[in-house]
Structures are given as C-alpha cells and as structure tokens.
Image (cartoon, helix red, strand yellow):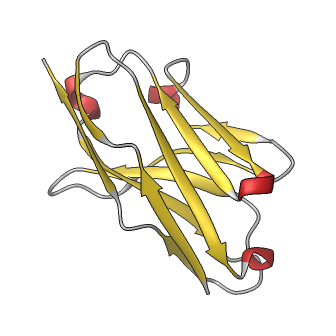
Amino acid sequence: QVQLVESGGGLVQAGGSLRLSCAASGNISSIDAMGWYRQTPGKLREFLAAITSGGRKNYEDSVKGRFTISRDNAKNTVYLQMNSLKPEDTAVYYCNAPNLYIERDYWGQGTQVTVSS
C-alpha cells in the first residue's frame, strides 16, 4: 500500500503561481512514475504531467510551458510548479502513482486550486 499526501493548493489571482507537493509513503518500492491530474465538477479526471524516478517527464499539451513537474527521490516527493495560472485551471488537483506490478493506481486526497479572475 502507498499513501500519497498533497499540499500547496489555495486561492491565487490569475497570472499567479502555486507549487503543489505530493509526498509518498508506505511501500515505495511498488511505484516508479508519479504524476498529477485535476478534476472539475461534472468532468473526468484529466492528466496533467508525470515523471519517472529517472527524471523522464510527460505533459498534457494544454499545460506545457506553464506547469513544471519535478521530484525529489530522496524525499519520495513530487512537485508541480504552476505559473501563469488561469481561471480555467481551477480544479481539485490529485497526485497519482501507478503500481508497478498490479493494475492499481494510488491517489492522494486532492487539493483545491482556485484561480480568481
């Protein structure tokens, strides 16, 4: 079992920045890639970015150039730096980590990001 705990959400004005953090604990050896998703009411959870333990990154097109994912393997923590935020970025942001050996994803509890216009 892996536990993911997000932090760093909040209220920010359009054009501002936030940095989200997600700390993993538990059976860390069962995961490698960690990533971020977001969800707004009535919509499916949307992939944003992911990073492997080796540092390989993948981004959804709409956030390329504005969001940056990084990780500190020593702390088992992944970050999402979000710049030039827009009101449409308002959502609950979730940390994700797929299990390497079974078809199971671990999810954090979510952190609210609200961007005011």
Quarter the N terminus occupies: bottom right
Q: Residue at x 62, y 66 (%)?
A: 24
Q: Position of residue 41 (x, y in %)?
A: 15, 55
In percent of the image, x 63 and y 83: which residue is there?
A: 103
Residue situated in front as seen by the camera: 93 or 6: 6
Q: Is residue 10 left or right of residue 75?
A: left
Q: Which residue is depicted at the point 64% across and 57% down?
A: 34
Who is closer to the viewer here, 25 or 63? 25
Residue 15: percent from left, percent from top: 30, 12
Residue 98 visible? The answer is: no
In the depicted structure, whether residue 47 falls above or below residue 63: below
Q: Position of residue 99 (x, y in %)?
A: 68, 77
Residue 88 as seen in the image, left or right of residue 26: left
Q: Quadrant of the C terminus?
A: top left
- The spot of residue 52 in percent (x, y) is 77, 52
Please name the residue shown 33% across and 21% down the image.
Answer: 85
Rendered position, 10 above or below 43: above
Q: Is residue 38 left or right of residue 72?
A: left
In the displayed orientation, state which residue is furthest to the right.
Answer: 54
Residue 59 visible in the shown view: yes
Of residues 82 and 47, which is closer to you in this image?
Answer: 82
